[in-house]
């Protein structure tokens, strides 16, 4: 098991809320081996536990930044707000969060302070080797279902959405691949090669029931078709 995953598990396993490894590292956990290099490390936390996750990272001394999407702006122009107080509820609507081990920020991304606690960033080529950065992703559950991107039409039973390897939870690969079917993953010079690599590695070994769920979810989301995915599916 990758040492980054093991250290993350040590941090979260006693936190008192559910979590799961997702993104490229989640794909690796399903495959049982490292398939490619990774530019970040993603952890899923359910939205009802967002405040607890923020408090955990603050208690550990990791600076944490809320990421906000501006309508019509590309991902490289998202703004980040440094969260200094758990009671600053302005960050409740942020799409995800970055938290960085102290003194490791220059190694990750090129952050530029715009004013006060507001930052912009530029992607910086980087390979995850140590446990020093977490991108916190937030999603919803209702009863026994995982609700994908708050879309009640796209759900997965929790026991199929959250899987385990060696006792460590990770997000099911079909859900990770569904997230990677979005516009950013199809257009970004940074994300697209990684997305294509993940689809090509996982689709041949994905169980048929999981594959059917993925195809149905993509059809429901893109009823007019999504040409760039045809070859990968």
Image (spheres, grey):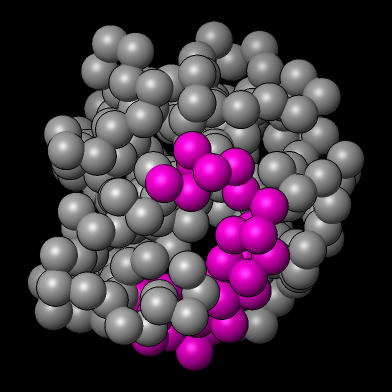
**Which quadrant would residue 83 be assigned to in this image?**
top left
Q: Give how far across and how far down residue 144 sits, in percent.
A: 34, 13
Magenta residue check for 64: no
Residue at 73% of width from left, 43% of height from top? Answer: 29
Residue at 63% of width from left, 70% of height from top? Answer: 200
In front: 8, or 87? 8
Q: Is residue 191 above or below residue 157?
A: below
In front: 86, or 134? 134
**Can residue 91 be seen in this snapshot?**
no
Q: Is residue 182 above or below residue 217?
A: below
Q: Give how far across and how far down residue 103 sits, in percent.
A: 70, 58
**Which quadrant would residue 1 be assigned to in this image?**
top right
* Residue at the front extreme of this rendering: 208
Segment tinted magenta in the rendering: 184-212
Q: Is residue 181 above or below residue 33?
A: below
Residue at 48% of width from left, 57% of height from top? Answer: 177
Q: Give how far across and how far down residue 195 sits, in percent.
A: 54, 72
Relative to 181, is 204 on the left or the right?
right
Q: Give how far across and how far down residue 225 sits, in percent.
A: 22, 74
């Amino acid at each position: 098991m990758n040492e980054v995953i093991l250290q993350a598990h040590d941090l979260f396993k006693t936190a008192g809320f559910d979590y799961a490894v997702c993104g490229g590292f989640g794909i690796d956990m399903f495959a049982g081996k490292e398939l490619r290099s990774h530019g970040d490390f993603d952890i899923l936390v359910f939205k009802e536990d967002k405040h607890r996750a923020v408090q955990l990272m603050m208690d550990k001394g990791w600076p944490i930044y809320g990421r906000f999407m501006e309508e019509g702006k590309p991902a490289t122009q998202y703004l980040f707000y440094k969260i200094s107080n758990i009671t600053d509820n302005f960050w409740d609507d942020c799409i995800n969060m970055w938290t960085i081990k102290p003194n490791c920020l220059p190694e990750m991304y090129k952050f530029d302070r715009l004013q006060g606690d507001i930052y912009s960033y530029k992607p910086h080529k980087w390979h995850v080797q140590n446990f020093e950065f977490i991108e916190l992703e937030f999603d919803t559950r209702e009863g026994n279902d995982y609700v994908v991107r708050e879309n009640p039409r796209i759900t997965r039973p929790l026991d199929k959405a959250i899987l385990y390897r060696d006792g460590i939870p990770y997000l099911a690969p079909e859900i990770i691949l569904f997230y990677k079917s979005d516009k950013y993953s199809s257009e970004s010079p940074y994300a697209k090669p990684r997305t294509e690599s993940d689809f090509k590695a996982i689709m041949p070994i994905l169980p048929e029931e999981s594959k059917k769920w993925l195809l149905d979810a993509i059809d429901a989301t893109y009823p007019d078709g999504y040409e760039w995915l045809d070859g990968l599916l």
